[in-house]
Image (spheres, rainbow, N blue to C red):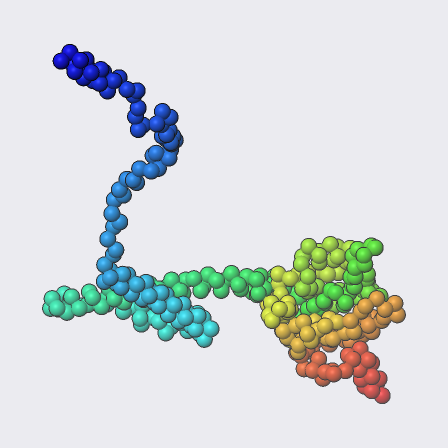
Amino acid sequence: MSRIVRSRLLFYSLKNNRPFCSNVSSNPPKEPIFSSASRINDQPPPTSPPPPPPPNASEKKSWSFLKFGLFGALTGAAATAGYATYAYTLEEVDHKTKALRTSANYTVGDDASALDKFQALLYSAAMTVPAKAIELYLDLRKSIEEQVRGFTEPASEKLLPDLHPQEQHVFTLVLDLNETLIYSDWKRDRGWRTFKRPGVDAFLEHLAQFYEIVVYSDQLSMYVDPIIERLDKKGCIRYRLSRSATMYQDGKHYRDLSKLNRDPSRILYVSGHALESSLQPENSVPIKPWKLEADDTSLLDLIPFLEYVARHRPADIRPVLASYQGRDIATEFIERSKEHQR
C-alpha cells in the first residue's frame, strides 16, 4: 500500500516539475515606429463644408442676355457715331438731331388727363438717354475738332496786323525761305550750314522801297527766326511767318494767303515751289529753286517785273500772273517790254 502511494507521489512530482516552455518567441517582433507627421497624415481629413449650390440656370441666362444686350447697344452707338462723323459735319448733325433732343423735354398742359401726363412722363424718360448721348457726342466732337484744327489750320484768321491807312495801296510781297532766299544742307563732317542765294541782299533792299515784304516758311519758328536775323541786317523784311501759320493737308504744310489779312488782288507769292506750296496758285510767282549754283541770277532777273507791278499798281495782280502761266516771268517780261518799245 505504501509502495503504491510512493509511486503515485513520485509520478505526480515528475509531472509537475518538467521544464517550462511556451509558444511565444523569446525575441518578439518589434512594432514599427512612425513619425507624428505620418500618423497625422494617416488620419482621415476633416470634413469640409459642402460647396454652394450652382446658380440657377434662369439667372445665368438673364445675366448673359443683359451682357449681350449692353454690348450690342454700345456697338451700335459706336457705329452710328462713326458714320455720323464720316458722313456729316458737326453743324449738320446738330441740325438733324435738334428735334430729337427737344423731344426729351416733352410736356403736356395742366388741363391734360392723368393718362396723358403719365404718357408724357414715360416718353420724356425714354428720350432722355438718347438725347443726352447725342449732346455728349456733339460736345466731344466739337472739342476734338478744335484740337485738330489747332494743328492743321493757321494759328489765327488774321496772320498779319491791319495795314496802316496810308499804305492801303501797297502790294504785299510774300517770299518763301528754303531754296528761294537761302539753301541749307547737312554733312556729317560739319553738320548744318546755311547759304545765301546770290543777289538776295540787293533783292530785299531794293524791293523794300515798293512792297510790304513777308517771309512765309513751313519751317518751325526756332529755325526761321535766327536765319532771318542773320539774313536781314537792314530790316527789309517786315513780318515773318513759320509753320504755325500754315495749313496742314495731306501730309504737307501749305501757305494760305487768304489768312494774311490782305487784299488777295495785291499779293504776290515768290517761291521755288510756288505752285506746290500755296493754296492760292493764282497769286504765285514761280522762280527756279536754288541749290548752291554759283552763277544763279534768278532773284536779280525778277526785280524789273516786280518793280513794274509796284509802280503801275494793276487793279488785280491775278490776271496779270495768269498771262505768264507756263513761262518764265522774268524772261517773258523782258520780251514783252522790248515788244512794247518797238
Left or right, 63 with reference to 87: left
**Quadrant where the N terminus lies?**
top left
On the question of residue 307 being in view, the answer is: no
Q: Residue at x 62, y 61 (%)?
A: 244
Where is residue 313 shown, x and y percent of the image? 70, 75
Name above or below for residue 315 compared with residue 60.
below
Left or right, 323 with reference to 150: right
On the question of residue 127 being in view, the answer is: yes
Q: Which image quadrant for residue 306?
A: bottom right
Q: Residue at x 62, y 63 (%)?
A: 245
Residue with the most extreme top position: 2
Q: Residue at x 78, y 71 (%)?
A: 289
Q: Nearer the viewer, residue 308 or 215?
A: 215
Q: Residue at x 16, y 15 (%)?
A: 4
Q: Which image quadrant for residue 302?
A: bottom right
Q: Nearer the viewer, residue 196 or 162?
A: 196
Where is residue 20 shown, x and y percent of the image? 29, 21
Name above or below for residue 228 compared with residue 278.
above
Left or right, 174 with reference to 53: right
**Quadrant where the C terminus lies?**
bottom right
Q: Nearer the viewer, residue 310 or 80?
A: 80
Where is residue 268 shown, x and y percent of the image? 69, 72
Q: Which image quadrant for residue 255?
A: bottom right
